[in-house]
Image: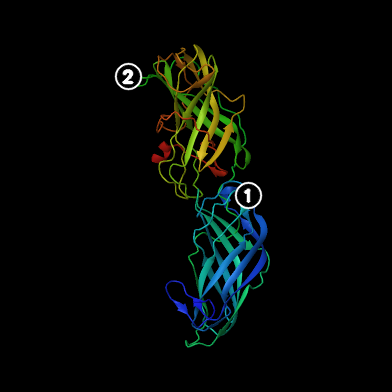
Amino acid sequence: MSAAGVAVMLGGAGILPAAGPVQAAEVSYATECVPPAISGLPPVQGTSKVLITAPAEAKVGDEIEVVWRTVEAASRNPGVLDLEKDTVKPAGTVRVTGAWTADLAVAGPRQNPPIPKNSPMVLPDMTGRLKLTRPGEITLTPGAYTINVSKPLSTDTKCAPEETVRPAHTIKVTEGGDPPPTGGTASGGTATGGTASGGTASGGTTAGGTASGGTTAGGTASGGTSGGGDGGPAAYPGKEVSVPYACRTPIGDKQATSPVRIDARGSGGSYALTVRFSRSVMDSPADIPAGTVKPSMEVALGGADKGTVHVEGPANKEPIKAGSPIGIPDLTGTYKPGATGRATLSPGVLTVEALGTTTTCTPPPNVRVSLELDTTAQPGGASGGTSSGGTGSAGPATGGSSASGGGLAETGAEDGGALRALALVAGTVVLLGGAVFAFTPWRLLRR
């Protein structure tokens, strides 16, 4: 059946032969699009081009379909992430004026081709149903709209007109068989995704702290405390130091300061390291899927030994709901000394893989020492390279007094794979592709 002389009904209501021919009209209007708050991106001014399709004539009692086609969105996908196929869902509002007034909610399916960074947004058509309740002429005018992106986080970009929008379509409503009610009703497709403005901002920016000086350098070398009777491993707690990181993110360079502490436990000639972060809590601004945030660090060696020790934490095991606290686990790894003498351990390059993005935070050259250990060289030890395991006999060590921080490591660095990602760590912020998150250790969350 042709479109002429019909109105398409949603929800299985069938096709009404009472409505007139379907017509379409396009309007353009200045629009401001506001990315989600977690992105840190500024509002975007652009032009929305919208085509509204509906019958030109219909009768009182008819329920017609109104179609909103976005010919051109006011903003583009910013240069943060490529958007996957079928991750974009629009919702908007059509203003009904004339014989009566109403706001018609329209929405589209989650359907789109892959959209690369810095490319125009491609949105599916939005539809809604309008019940005609009074004779006379009514006009349809597009207004605000929202672009929801489901991955890697569910985020809304909200777009709103910055000028008076001219009507895009006029419908002549004549008397029908139903008694004329007192007003119009408008029902649209389900508007999932918020009110509107802007290209999709799935990434976010980072809020960094200012660099503040560290607390004291590491403990003095005089042996650690016994780890629990009968020759158990000795524990060497480090000092908490404040590290002013310079971070390179997908959306630019950022500064942030993070309190970090390195603890050790002797086992043979090697040391099990745990990097802890001071308590700091922030609610997640959006849903975070399980297994999408994984931090790591290269602990810097100095003094008698040289090189780095790789430590890492587990990915978040459970999804983190919006409004819930975000925690970062302890980072763990094994230090096998490559030299005999007094070795120093300091926080090094911090990385986090998060939601397909990579951020890298580098400490200053004069970063404070968190821990000092009296070591004995082990075969295959660090001394200029990267230490990643091994056994031997621990030498005496010096630990500083214990500082506040996380509990025991959730897991060790069992896979041994170096993570090429990055983030800020507890007490400050983690840069999830630009989003700002503060973390608290898992132990505190378990409490």
Residue 100 appears left or right of 332: right
Q: Alpha-carbon distance for marks 2 and 1?
A: 61 Å
The percent position of residue 155, horizontal first and vertical second, equals 53, 53
Q: Using the image, tell me which numbered label, if any, was put on residue 118.
A: 1
Disc 2 secondary structure class: loop
The percent position of residue 430, horizontal first and vertical second, equals 53, 39
Packing grade of label 2 (10 A; few <14, some 14-19, many >=20) is few
Front in this rendered view, residue 285 or 48: 48
Q: Using the image, tell me which numbered label, if any, was put on residue 267.
A: none
Residue 256 in view in this figure? yes
Residue 44 appears left or right of 103: right
Q: Residue at x 62, y 25 (%)?
A: 365
Front in this rendered view, residue 53 or 399: 53
The percent position of residue 194, horizontal first and vertical second, equals 53, 60
Looking at the rendered structure, the kind of residue marked 1 is Asn
Q: Place residue 52 in its image quadrant.
A: bottom right
Looking at the rendered structure, the kind of residue marked 2 is Gly
Of tags 2 and 1, which is closer to the observer?
Answer: 1
Front in this rendered view, residue 113 or 50: 113
Number of dots carrying numbers: 2
Q: Residue at x 50, y 28 (%)?
A: 261
Packing grade of label 1 (10 A; few <14, some 14-19, many >=20) is some
Considering only vertical position in the picture, is 332 above or below 38?
above
| Residue indicated by mark 2 | 229
Residue 357 appears left or right of 396: right
> Mark 2 and 1 residues: CB-CB less than 8 Å, in contact?
no
Disc 1 secondary structure class: loop
Residue 447 in view in this figure? no
